Every structure is written in C-alpha cells, then in structure tokens.
Image (tube, rainbow, N blue to C red):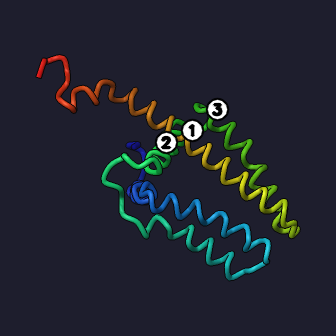
Amino acid sequence: MTQRSSPVDRFFWSRHENPGSVWTLVGAYPMLVPSVYRRDRRLLVGTLLFVAVNPLLFSPPADDRAWATRVVRGERVWLDRGLRSSRPETAFAVLAAPVYLYTLGAAAARRPVRTALGTVVSVVVMLAFFDRMVRLYEDASEADDPGTDATASGTGDDGE
C-alpha cells in the first residue's frame, strides 16, 4: 500500500488482510468481554496472546475479493492518509470508543444485561466501521486506477 512502510509492517498487514484473520479477531472481542466479566486472567491472557499472534497464523490473501480483505485495506488507506485527512472515519472511531469502554466497564462491574447489550452494540458498531473502511478502500482504488474494469475485461474502446 505505502512506500513508507517497513518490511515488518507490510508482513503484518498482508497477513491481517486474510479474511480468517479478520473474522477471528472479530470473535476475539466477545471473548475479551467475558474474561473481564469473570475476572478470568487465563482467558484474558489467552485472548490477548491470540490477538497478538493472529496475523502470523494466516497467509496473505491472493486478491481483494473478500469483504474482510477490503476492510483491512481500507484501514491502511485511512492510516496512510493520516487520521486528520479522513475526518468522518476518525470521528466514527472516536465516537465508537465510549461504546467499547462502556461494555468493558459493565463487564468489570458484573452487570450482565449491560454487558450483553454493550457487546452486541460494540459488534454492530465494529461492523459499521468495517463497512466504512470498505467504501474508503473502494473509493481509493477507483481514484488510483480509473477504468481498470473495462480494460481488464477486454471491453475497452478498442472494439474487441
């Protein structure tokens, strides 16, 4: 994505683009919440370790057909442009943070209904953010390479 990234950075992101990495990380959040609720240090440490090594478990995807791959590539576009250049996405992330903190606070206070509600809302917010990242990636891809679809499929202006 960016010329400025280090080999380690490219290695991490290319593997995180694998849909398996994305979806297992989405599943890690609902595991983090009960680890806080139950005060289960082993589950907490296990979940955090899994999150840390997750990208190492997957190979880079062959293409960007998977929605989850485009989510991660959108995150790269967002981060590469700088947080201030993408105000709607940054605002979305800033406004989502209290939802996640509320959920973890409810779990720490052992409030089951609030914890469950917060977890559901957190996942919905996460998926809405993912959708925004996909649109950001697709918009950036179109801006970088307009007309690719027509020329790649052999239906360009040359009449073939």
Image x and y of residue 95, in percent: 74, 42
Query: In the figure, residue 159 lies in which quadrant?
Result: top left
Please give the name of the residue rendered at 49% of the width and 46% of the height, measured from the top-left corner.
Answer: 71
Identify the mark nearer the N-term, 3 or 2: 2
Please give the name of the residue rendered at 48% of the width and 45% of the height, measured from the top-left corner.
Answer: 76
Nearer to us: label 3 or label 1: 1
The residue at which mark 3 appears reads as: 88
Identify the mark nearer the N-term, 2 or 1: 2
Q: Which numbered disc covers residue 74?
A: 2
Please give the name of the residue rendered at 72% of the width and 46% of the height, measured from the top-left corner.
Answer: 96
Question: Dot 3 lies on which element?
Answer: helix
- How far is disc 3 from disc 2 in space, using C-alphas? 13 Å
* Picture layout, residue 145 above or below residue 66: above
Mark 3 Cα shell of 10 Å, populated few (<14), some (14-19), many (≥20): few
The residue at which mark 1 appears reads as: 132
Marks 2 & 1, CB-CB < 8 Å contact: yes
Question: Dot 1 lies on which element?
Answer: helix
Identify the mark nearer the N-term, 3 or 1: 3
- How far is disc 2 from disc 1 in space, using C-alphas? 8 Å
Question: Dot 2 lies on which element?
Answer: helix
* Quadrant housing the C terminus: top left
Nearer to us: label 2 or label 1: 1
The disc labelled 2 sits on which kind of residue? Gly
* Picture layout, residue 141 above or below residue 98: above
Mark 2 Cα shell of 10 Å, populated few (<14), some (14-19), many (≥20): many
Image x and y of residue 92, in percent: 68, 39
